[in-house]
Image: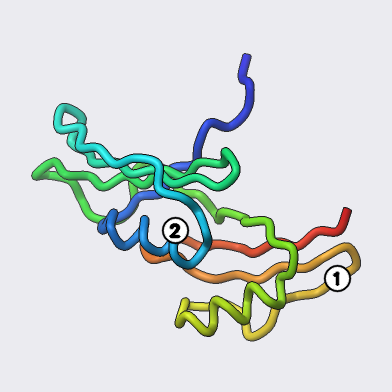
Amino acid sequence: MGKGIDHVCVVSDDLDKSVDFYTRVLGFEFVMREALESQGIEIARVQYRGDVIEFVRHTAPDARPGRGDGVIELIGISVPDVRAGAKRLRGLGVECLMDEPVIMPGGGFFFFRGPSGERLELVQTEG
């Protein structure tokens, strides 16, 4: 039935802040932004090599801030060098959830937070 993942959606209370973080800090490129008044939302999309993250801000008067209907545990972002990536994040003042990356056979990982509190992971794999 499916052909693959089209996008991952993250709830954001500030689309400008989310787009800025993912483009400036993580190297994604801006794709689009649109208000869908009939749905009570505003969306923005960024992408990196075809992988799309969509941010949604609920705009209806009765919308509660923060989380939507579901929860995504984290978004893993592939990097060539997890140590260099972690160092760059720290230098930019990003909220890091670990002191140092975990290095293991075949790669490593490092957890940090995005601008809406979403948990993100740098992932380095060999091969």
Mark 2–mark 1 CB contact (< 8 Å): no
Disc 2 versus disc 1: distance between alpha carbons?
29 Å
Please tell me which of labels 2 and 1 falls first in the chain.
Answer: 2
User: Vertical placement of 96 versus 48: above or below?
Assistant: below
Mark number, residue 104: 1
Residue occupying image coordinates x 55% and y 56%: 74
| Helix, strand or loop for disc 1 | strand
What's the residue type where badge 2 is placed? Answer: Thr
| Marks 2, 1: nearer the viewer | 2
The answer to whether residue 69 is left or right of residue 7 is left
For mark 2, does the 10 Å Cα neighbourhood hold few (<14), some (14 to 19), or many (20 or more) residues? some
Residue occupying image coordinates x 32% and y 54%: 12
User: Vertical placement of 76 versus 92: above or below?
Assistant: above
Q: Is residue 117 visible?
A: no
Residue occupying image coordinates x 55% and y 62%: 120
What's the residue type where badge 1 is placed? Answer: Met
Where residue 90 appears, as percent x and y from the top left, is: 54, 82
* Residue of label 2: 23
| Helix, strand or loop for disc 2 | helix
